[in-house]
Image (cartoon, grey):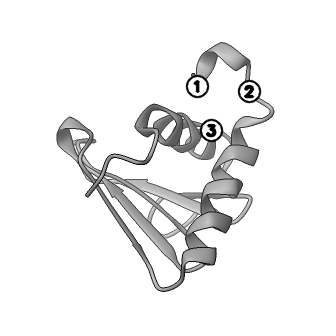
Amino acid sequence: MKNELNIAKLLAAFEVIMEKGETTEFGKRYQGVEASTDYDGYNVYLKGNGVELHIGFHNIYDLKYDQAHLKDSFLKKIDSLLQDTPAGDHR
């Protein structure tokens, strides 16, 4: 897959969700995005609104969605999660 996603930004959003989110069966949910990780932390998962993102070791990722507008909406939601964090934390 072409490296079109900013992994550092996605991982920063993961941290925001884990810090501010409500506990779910699988991880934490904040503003409609659920974040989870496996037991060793090498795999990170973000999902919401029909999109599932898996970020693995060495920042390899797999983004699954049925329609492009769902992906776009999901990525906008990720951006909005980071709006309230200090600029240096996710760039």
Q: Residue at x 55, y 76 (%)?
A: 68
Q: Earlier in the sequence, mark 3 or mark 1?
A: 3
Q: Position of residue 34 (x, y in %)?
A: 55, 62
The quadrant holding residue 71 is bottom right
CB of mark 2 within 8 Å of CB of mark 1?
yes
Q: Which residue is mark 1?
A: 90
Residue on which disc 2 sits: 85
Question: Are circles 3 and 1 on residues that touch, CB within 8 Å?
Answer: no
Taking the spot 40% from the left edge, 62% from the top edge, the residue there is: 53
Answer with mark 3 or mark 2, whichever residue precedes in sequence: 3
Q: Which residue is mark 3?
A: 16
Q: In this view, which residue lies farthest toward the right?
A: 84
Label 3 SS: helix
The disc labelled 1 sits on which kind of residue?
His
Q: Is residue 45 left or right of residue 38?
A: right
Question: Foreground: 12 or 73?
Answer: 73
